[in-house]
Image (cartoon, helix red, strand yellow):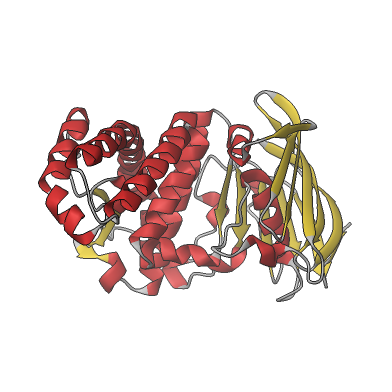
């Protein structure tokens, strides 16, 4: 997928901007707080309908204004498409694809292919299980429409079940109805997650080796029900839901299912989250991101756009590996940096922009 151009209106400190991108490497250079990361964030929002930061969308709108609008022209395997998305401080979004109003923001994921790598992504390896589940859900929703659908309905049923568990009187037969629906959707979710984990186990370890050489890293899927045999996921989940039914009633919360699963990351057999250095956590995160980048190309049949905040690649000593040389999947890239730096010659020419106080200019 290629983004040919995009426009920004009232997004953070950028009042108005129109940007034509090169099909390969694009670099935005600016001082801290100049707005360079906002450009990356705006493009990611245009392509996914959300920020790459865990924040309220209202803070994305320029101070003192009530709405923001983003518009862009992309080219994917099916041809050119115009995308426009607007949102206001009340949380209302309006999406248009080829000038047709779409009711579901998730429709964006059928047209766009994008991976971002930003400083906050360190939470992927250093943070809570929720960060890793969010990573899996975002990646797989871009890859499989059926995953996004199953995830939506799974969360809807889960919400209904949890609300019912909080009632004064709980009927086990009613819970079994919720559980049966959860199992149906969970099978798709877990199967797709395991499919990516199988890829990550091999390729992620290779990419990590680019940073730490022979140091052993492992990624594995951790669930509260058996997932070793994909054919037995449904029966294993059913058994665990039945086994934990009384406890769920007692604590009034659903505790079994993919909404509680995680990715275990270990260095030399030791928990990376609990005992790994910051450098190890950062490199393991990068390995996961770039493995996801390649996986998305493999499934969708087109290269994703890479949005890269260059600050996270400032690795010391042996870990100073140019991120753009790691993956053969690299296609179009939009980067932000406080300074210029060398780009591998075989990646082609680089289009440069500067930004000052929210005003962006092309460098001739």
Q: Residue at x 20, y 54 (%)?
A: 248
Classify the position of the C terminus by image quarter: bottom right
Residue 104 rendering spot, x and y as whole percentages:
62, 37
Q: Residue at x 42, y 39 (%)?
A: 151
Residue 9 rendering spot, x and y as whole percentages:
83, 56
Classify residue 216 by image quadrant: bottom left
State whether residue 210 appears in this view.
no
Left or right of 296 on screen, residue 56: right
Q: Is residue 38 above or below residue 179?
A: below
State whether residue 332 appears in this view.
yes
* Farthest-out residue, bottom: 32
Q: Residue at x 21, y 34 (%)?
A: 233
Q: How many marks?
A: 0
Q: Residue at x 58, y 31 (%)?
A: 302
Classify the position of the N terminus by image quarter: top right
* Farthest-out residue, front: 169
Classify residue 33 by image quadrant: bottom right
Q: Is residue 232 above or below residue 217?
A: above
Classify residue 129 by image quadrant: bottom left
């Amino acid at each position: 997928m290629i983004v040919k151009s995009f426009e920004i209106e009232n997004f953070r400190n950028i009042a108005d901007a129109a940007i034509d991108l090169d099909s390969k490497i694009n670099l935005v250079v600016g001082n801290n707080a100049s707005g360079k990361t906002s450009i990356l964030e705006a493009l990611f929002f245009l392509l996914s309908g959300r920020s790459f930061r865990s924040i309220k969308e209202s803070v994305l709108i320029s101070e003192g204004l009530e709405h923001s609008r983003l518009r862009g022209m992309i080219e994917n395997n099916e041809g050119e498409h115009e995308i426009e998305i607007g949102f206001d401080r009340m949380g209302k979004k309006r999406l248009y694809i080829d000038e047709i109003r779409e009711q579901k923001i998730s429709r964006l994921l059928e047209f766009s292919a994008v991976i971002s790598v930003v400083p906050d992504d360190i939470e992927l390896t250093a943070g809570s299980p929720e960060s890793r589940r969010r990573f899996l859900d975002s990646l797989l929703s871009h890859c499989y429409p059926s995953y996004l659908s199953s995830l939506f309905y799974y969360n809807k049923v889960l919400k209904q079940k949890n609300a019912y568990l909080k009632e004064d009187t709980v009927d086990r037969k009613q819970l079994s109805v919720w559980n049966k629906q959860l199992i149906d959707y969970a099978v798709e979710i877990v199967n797709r997650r395991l499919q990516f984990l199988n890829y990550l186990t091999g390729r992620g370890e290779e990419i990590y080796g680019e940073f730490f050489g022979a140091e052993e890293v492992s990624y594995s899927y951790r669930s509260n029900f058996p997932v070793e045999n994909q054919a037995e996921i449904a029966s294993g989940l059913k058994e665990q839901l039945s086994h934990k039914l009384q406890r769920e009633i007692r604590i009034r919360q659903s505790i079994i299912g993919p909404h509680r699963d995680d990715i275990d990351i270990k260095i030399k057999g030791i928990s990376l989250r609990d005992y790994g250095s910051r450098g190890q956590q950062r490199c393991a995160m990068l390995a996961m991101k770039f493995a996801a980048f390649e996986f998305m190309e493999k499934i969708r049949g087109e290269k994703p756009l890479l949005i890269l905040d260059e600050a996270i690649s400032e690795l010391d000593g042996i870990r100073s590996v140019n991120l753009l040389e790691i993956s053969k999947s690299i296609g179009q890239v939009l980067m932000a940096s406080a300074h210029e730096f060398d780009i591998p010659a075989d990646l082609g020419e680089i289009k440069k922009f500067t930004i000052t106080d929210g005003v962006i200019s092309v460098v001739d």
